[in-house]
Image (cartoon, helix red, strand yellow):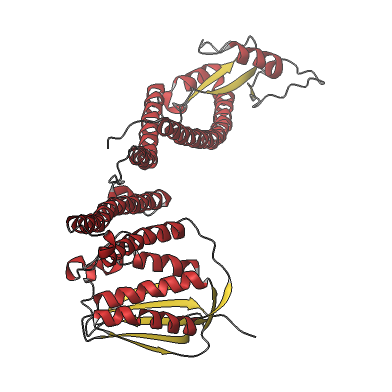
Amino acid sequence: MQFRYSRFYVRTALYIGGALAVFVVVGALSFGAIATWELQGYVETRHSTLAHQAAEVLRERGEPGLIDWMREEANVPNNVSVYILNSNSTDLLGKTIPAQYANFIRDYVIGSTPENDNFQPVRLAPRIVSVDGTSYAFLVIPKGVSLWGSNATVIGLLLVAIMVIVSVAWLIARTISRPVSELQMAVRELASGDVGVRVPESISSRNDELGALAADFNRMAGRLQQLIEGRESLFQEMSHELRSPLARLQAAIELAAERNESPVSERGQIELEIARMNRVIGEMLRYSSLDNHVTVKQQLLRVNRQLQNIVATEQIEASNAGCELQLDTEPDLTIIGDPELIGRGFENILRNAIRFAPAGSRVSIQARRESDAAGQPQITVTVNDNGPGIDAEQLQRVFEPYVKLNAGQNSQPSTGLGLAIVKRVVEHHYGSVTAENRDGGGLCVTVRLPAAELS
């Protein structure tokens, strides 16, 4: 997927750039204010020092000596301009002084100051007086000193600051908006039907909220892909499972017709195939109902009695498979739940064990009252068989819908929904179900359900 500059990206860049610009401006103004205050104090100090030096020269050497003193570059700092004005507001060296300064000197320093004037100058210019009583105004004016040097330097620094702000804003905005853009494109591709789309690992592995969102999207897309592929596989399996008995039904009817017999003579075979189709369709409907948030009845249920009834019912099927069922249960194992759903779940587990149990083996069922990790009472039911077990890498998929594992090791038809129904039933009763391979061979399925407290 190619990154594109979206409106979100532009807005993010503008927000970040604006925030950085405000930060830089406030920082520059603060720095400038502090530096100006420091410079003002420096100029005031230099003003007072130079004024005393000029007064000393005027007293000792008169006006000619004062003019010579002003012409000496070593006496005047480079960052200020010194003006000494006579009564006509004319500089002794003939330098031009800005009009506002000249008017101020004439009205407030050399001339008389009105008593009730409300003008308060920032810095009064001192008067120095010669031996013969002539007054001069001494004025020090800063030479437009820049805190960073020349104006060209200031402009250059501003341009550099703008470039840095734009670059940083671009990088930060790209860091934030690129995952959003990638996720947006992935969502659009998923909506268009591409269930194999994933957000790149460089984004889903980030240790932030965007990375977590991308990882959640990948998990969602993976789950959707599994379900869709499982349903496609189911349709193929169902087509095969339904076509086979239909073909056998047709063959039985045709055989009866060839013999000039009634189809009743093939009734046993016909009933068997019809029962097989009913079982396939029934499991599909049962899982569909559980997948659509079925309402669970809340009844007091004795698990030990229900297991006894199920084992008694399945004894015939176990005998046909050549295996034996053994039940070991504690008394009074009670839960709150739906008897029909719980019975259906245990039946599926037991039938699955019988299906894979080799002839002459034993399928054991145990039911106990235990405590969970939090100390709460629970009912634990385990079903053990001596079958081939399940490959370790496929074990975690055993409860997924439409998944048929070890199909090649057993010739009996299967919809791949039996254990998926078990998982749904147990989850509807706030329990858990797990499967693991036994050390001696076979599979162990464990169901844990919250126990009911009887007062």
Above or below, 170 relative to 112? below
The quadrant of the picture occupied by the N terminus is: top left
- Image quadrant assignment for residue 296: bottom right
Examine the image and state in which quarter residue 425 appears: bottom left
On screen, residue 425 above or below 384: above
Foreground residue among 139 and 230: 230
Quadrant containing the C terminus in the rendered view: bottom right
Query: Residue at coordinates 20% horizontally, 70% vertically from top-left?
Result: 410
Please give the name of the residue rendered at 52% of the width and 16% of the height, measured from the top-left corner: 64
Q: State left or right for residue 60 relative to residue 443.
A: right
Q: Left of 226 or right of it: where is 148?
A: right
| In-front residue for pair 133/257 | 257
Q: Residue at x 63, y 9 (%)?
A: 88
x, y (%) of residue 218?
A: 34, 51
Q: Quadrant of residue 247?
A: bottom left
Residue 142 x/y as whole percent: 52, 24
Judge left or right: residue 397 versus residue 144: left
Residue extending farthest to the front is 260
Q: Residue furthest right?
A: 116
Query: Is residue 288 shown left or right of residue 267?
Result: right
Q: Nearer the viewer, residue 253 or 403?
A: 253
> Can the viewer see residue 414?
no
The residue that appears at 24% across and 54% down in the rendered structure is 243
Residue 257 pos. (x, y %)? 21, 55
- Total number of numbered discs in the rendering: 0
Q: Position of residue 146 (x, y in %)?
A: 45, 27
**Residue 450 or residue 314, whichever sits in front:** 314
Is residue 117 visible in this depiction of the protein?
yes
